[in-house]
Image: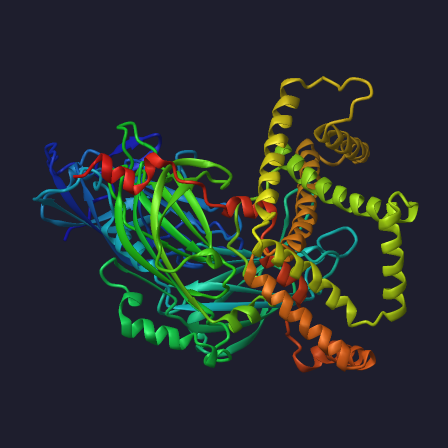
Amino acid sequence: MSALPLSSPGRSLNGINIVGPSNVLPLPANLGMYQLDIVLKRGNNLAIRDRGGTSDPYVKFKIAGKEVFRSRTINKNLNPVWEESVSLLVDNLQEPLYVKVFDYDFGLQDDFMGSAYLYLESLEHKRTLDVTLELKDPQYQDHDLGTLDLAITVLPKEGDFREAQPHQSMRLSDVHRKAQLWRGIVSISLIEGRGLQPMDSNGFSDPYVKFRLGNQKYSSKTIPKTLNPQWREQFDFHLYEELGGIVDITVWDKDAGKKDDFMGRCQVDLSALSKEQTHKLDIPLEEGEGMLVLLVTLTASAAVSISELSVNILDDPDERREILNRYSLLRSFHNLKDVGVVQVKVIRAEGLMAADVTGKSDPFCVVELSNDRLLTHTVYKNLNPEWNKVFTFNVKDIHSVLEVTVFDEDRDRSADFLGKVAIPLLRIQNGERKAYVLKNKELTGPTKGVIFLEIDVIFNAVKAGLRTLIPIEQKYIEEEPKVSKQLLLQNFNRVRRGVLFLINVGCYINSCFEWESPQRSICAFLLFIVVVWNFELYMIPLVLLLPLAWNYILIASGKDTRLGDVQALEDLLEDAEEEFDKDDKVPGSFPPEGAGLPASRILEDILASWHFEWIHVMVDSKRKGFMNKLYAIQDVCISVQNALDEVASYGERIKNTFNWTVPFLSWLAIVALCVATVAIYVIPLRYIVLAWGVNKFTKKLRDPYTIDNNELLDFLSRVPSDVQMVQYQELKLDPSQSPNKRKKNNPG
């Protein structure tokens, strides 16, 4: 073992230090494969990037512009010891190994700590060399950024290798495969904050909290104008590492129109917590003031599995019998969180889109259920891939939607989207192998190709019903919402449709008072007298049962109006899109006198008035910059966009509850209304109100850290809106893409 001298001649590329010994003869260019074994040992005297005089360094290796390795993060250390190894397959030694070091900053952009190039062609065969890389910053070449110690071995490989596999990290592939199977679940209840730092001029803050465990991220709601916020929210993380992991927590002050203010950070070391036990943690904030109160629970989980098509649990009669017994009605109150199990067989895809210049694709499949996410292997250079994989998930919420997405692997950049399907678990027909037409990213229209799936769902109906009345599981942080004129117009039209329905109902009732139809008015008058004279409180839930019964009779008799609602929404969305395009083409046009204003024109007038008011306010505020003004307008538009969507969605969900869009939820509503009717009829109202009040007043005394929820809103959150109905609707398979047609055309 010999260390390379730092004083030996090297190369310089764009001001970045390149290490390469001059006393080693370069290897000849060779089209064969090489195995590159690298041991990342340690860093020495690395750059300071944090306020406390330390850094949280991690290292990235790149070859030909593709990241092939990323080390773990060593917290608060300028002389970190990694001792991590990686084996890479490379097709030639002409491409240098590019090493970059970063300081990990949760919630912010990671800070650059230096980089170096290592030219592989200058290394000897079959010999391990100790290499010291001197880190440099091309913008500040005089700065001393420390060094990295590596051990490098290059071995020629013989045998047949695929063209698409060079530069692939065997270590990363192995870790990637194993990382899909988590070993437990970490439930974090964010209870409250105490004595937080005031960040606003009024002496308060608008705090919210960000959590991160690996690539899993959550963000809490914002509590306005307080230094002692009460969040009462729960977040579930997957635990991949046997020894636990570190949960990074940061607190921020929400500022409309400018960058949010940092209020402090803390960490939770999961390896120090015992499993199957709830831990109450009072954690003081670093780089800030105050503390957070958390409840952390670690539970073991056998939630998922990946296997070949020939090996799966539900095809084994004994295993299937055991699972059916586990979710039988007799065990309805055993482990309420374990609602059921779903098995997904990803068979193959046909006729996919060509994403590469060669007219082919390298497709792989991602299967997601809530926050559970698994991947198939990649089938290279194929538009009709066969995966034949079986994925098994535990079902925590029967109202979850199974999402299957096909991507094209691209070794030089992020994967390309090829198509997607979304399948609600309650719509699955067990054991049926179906061809699903792939849709676009928004799930509103078809894209090229079909995917063949076979899905089985086994669940306990009682557990599923009880789970419906607790808050829905949040998904990991998704893309930041963006202002979209088209989306604004669509949401505006959805709200307008609901308002028009209420107006029509009001006009119908008013027509009874106006005696426009004598027969109708007489019937309404007699009904009014009978109902008022005999009214009892229990009749309210009883009356709500009538539209459920009426719609059930209509559906049973073949007069299903639900498809008409979906078609009406599709037409509405298409009209909004056409109107949006028309307005864009003729920006200064106005309708002729006497004609009705289009929805987009009304919406533009509303936004214009808000825009004028905001400009008037912002002109008075001379201290704000131009970007702050843009952010303020954007925040207002996003708030309006989200508010319109929320109002429209809740109206559509109420309607879809009564028209049996999801029969399971409609039956659940019937059970709840029947129980309410009987309870109000049998129990005096004062006792019911008294029990409700006693429960409300004593809830915090009985459980100081309880998480409040509204059962009605939790129920409605499971009912799909009209937009979701369009997204979940299965597209009809083109006859040319059906499996029978393909077999007939290609019997071989």
Q: Is residue 596 left or right of residue 122?
A: right
Residue at 26% over, 38% down: 742
Q: Quadrant of residue 698?
A: bottom right
Rendered position, 209 above or below 445 = below
Q: Visible in this render: residue 212?
A: yes
Residue at 58% over, 49% down: 560
Q: Visible in this render: residue 140?
A: no
Residues 581 and 2: in front is: 581
Q: Is residue 616 left or right of residue 218?
A: right
Q: x, y (%) of residue 165?
A: 21, 42
Q: x, y (%) of residue 692?
A: 75, 77
Q: x, y (%) of residue 54?
A: 46, 55
Rendered position, 177 above or below 490 = below
Q: x, y (%) of residue 597?
A: 76, 26
Q: Is residue 116 left or right of residue 107?
A: left
Quarter holding the C terminus is top left
Residues 183 and 510: in front is: 510
The colouring scheme, among rainbow, by chain, secondary structure or one colour, is rainbow
Residues 560 and 664: in front is: 560
Q: How many marks?
A: 0
Q: Is residue 25 left or right of residue 744?
A: left
Q: Quadrant of residue 189?
A: bottom right
Residues 520 and 308: in front is: 520
Outermost residue toward the left in this view = 158
Outermost residue toward the right in this view = 514
Rendered position, 437 above or below 698 = above
